[in-house]
Image (cartoon, rainbow, N blue to C red):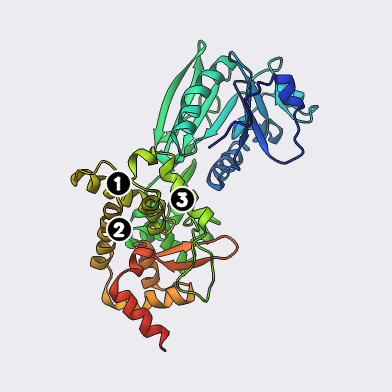
Amino acid sequence: MTQALSQTLLTFEEYCAYDDGTDTRYQLEAGVLTPMPPESPRNSRIALWLLTHFLPFVPLNQLTNKAEIFVGGSRATCRLPDLMVLSLELAAILETETREPITFDMPPPLLVVEVVSPGKKNEDRDYRYKRSEYAARGIIEYWIVDPGKSHVMILTLVEGLYEEKNFSGGDRIQSEIFKELNLIIFDNLDRVPKGVSDHLFFDYAAQLQELHCTLIYTVPLAALYSPRNMSNTFGSPNIVPMVNIFHFERDRCDLAYNEPVLAKMASVIEQRVDVDAVFADRESLLELARSSGGHVRQLMQIMQTSCLTASTRGHAKIEKDDVLYAVNKAQFEFERLIPAEYYPLLAQTCVTKNVSKDETGQLMLFNTSVLEYNGTNRWNDVNPLVKKIDAFQQSLEAFQAL
C-alpha cells in the first residue's frame, strides 16, 4: 500500500531532481510524490526468476528492474515496473544516464512486467491504470503476473489498444515478441498426497526435466524433507515459508507474538475488506491473524467460516464469538485427522522447534499440523490450532516432565 507524501504537485523535472537523502523509493502519480513500500520477497523473486529466463534471448543490458518510466496523463506520472525489456536503442541511451528515467523523448521499452500485490488499490493500479498508461506510451507488450490468482495476463498492443490473453496453471505462456520463450506454470502440485509427489518428483524427475520449455512446479514442502534429495535433480528450490508472526526462541514452546508482523498478517484481510464495516472490533481481526500461525490459506479459511457464521447468526458484523466458532471448527478438523500416536511427536517438535525427517514428519508438514518458518533461522513449530487440542497439551506435559 502506498501513501502520498504531500499534496504538492510536482513536474517531471522536479521529480527527477528530487532527493531526500534516504534510500526510499518514490513513484510519481498524477503529480503527487508517493513513497513506495519495500518490494515483497515473493514479487522480487518472481521478477528475478523471469529476468533469468529472458536472458537466453535478451542481452543483460536490455533487462532492468530499476528504471523508471514517464507515462502520459493530465498530470505527471512516473512508474517503476518490476521488470522491463529494453530495445537496443533505449538500452544504449540509458547507459549514459545516471538515474535512468525513461523520458518521453526516448523510445518506449519493448515489454513491461508488473507483479500484482494484494489489495484492491494495487489490483486497480496494475490492471486498469497502468494498462491505459502503457498503451498510450506505446509499449508493445505488458505482462500482469498475479501470484495470488496463479494467473498471467499478456497484453499486446494492436493499433493503439491492448489485446489480452490469459494464462493459468498448466498453460503455456506465449509472448508475441519472444515466440521462442516457453514458460509453463504447474500450480497446486504442492497439495498432492505424499505418494503422488514422490512418484512425480522422484520417480519421474528425469522426465519432468526433459520437457523443452521453462516450467514452474509447485512442490509439497514435505517433499523437501525426503532423504532422496530433490535438489539433486531440480536444483535449489525457492521455499515460501509461513509468515513469521512470532519472536523465535528455540528453548520456548509458547512463543511471543511479533506485533508489527502480526499487524502485517492482519493487513492481508484489511487490503481486501473494509474492516470497520466487517468486524465488530479489531481484536477479532487480530485473533484471526494469531490463529493462522502465519499460514495465509489458513487465515483465509478461518475468515470465510467467520463470515458465514456471522451471516447465519444474523450479526451485522463479525463478532468475537463468530471468530471463536471458526477457530474451533478448524481445530476440530485437526482433531479428526491426527492419529493419537502423532501427539508425542508434535510435543517434541514444539519443544525442539525441529520436525523429524522421517515419513511421519513429512506427513505432519503435508497436513499442516506442523509449519515451517525461516529467516535468520530455519525452524518448525506446531500449528496454533493443534496446540489447542487437549491430547496435544497432555503429550506436551508428559514430554516436558521427562
Which residue is at the far front? 281
Q: Amino acid at mark 3?
A: Met
> Which circle, 3 or 1, is nearer the viewer?
1
Residue behind mark 2: 327
Query: Decide: marks 2, 3 in contact (CB < 8 A)?
Result: no
Looking at marks 3 and 1 on the same chain, the residue that comes earlier in the sequence is marked by: 3
Query: Which quadrant would the C terminus be assigned to in this image?
Result: bottom left
Can you give x and y, in whole percent of width and height, for residue 312 in the image? 18, 45
Looking at marks 1 and 2 on the same chain, the residue that comes earlier in the sequence is marked by: 1
Q: Quadrant of residue 153?
A: top left
Taking the image as shown, residue 396 lies to the left or right of residue 255, namely: left
Q: CA distance from mark 1 to mark 2?
A: 13 Å
Query: Decide: marks 1, 2 in contact (CB < 8 A)?
Result: no
Q: Amino acid at mark 2?
A: Val
> Which circle, 1 or 2, is nearer the viewer?
1
Can you give x and y, in whole percent of width and height, for residue 209 in the image? 48, 50
Residue behind mark 3: 265
Answer whether residue 352 is visible to the viewer in this image.
Answer: yes
Circle 3 SS class? helix
Looking at marks 2 and 3 on the same chain, the residue that comes earlier in the sequence is marked by: 3
Q: Which mark is residue 241?
A: none
Circle 2 packing at 10 Å, graded few (<14), some (14-19), many (20+), is many
Query: Decide: marks 3, 1 in contact (CB < 8 A)?
Result: no
Circle 1 SS class? loop
Circle 2 SS class? helix
Q: Amino acid at mark 1?
A: Ile
Residue behind mark 1: 318
Answer whether residue 186 is visible to the viewer in this image.
Answer: no
Can you give x and y, in whole percent of width and height, for residue 345 in the image? 38, 77
Instruction: Decide: is 384 above or below 61.
Output: below
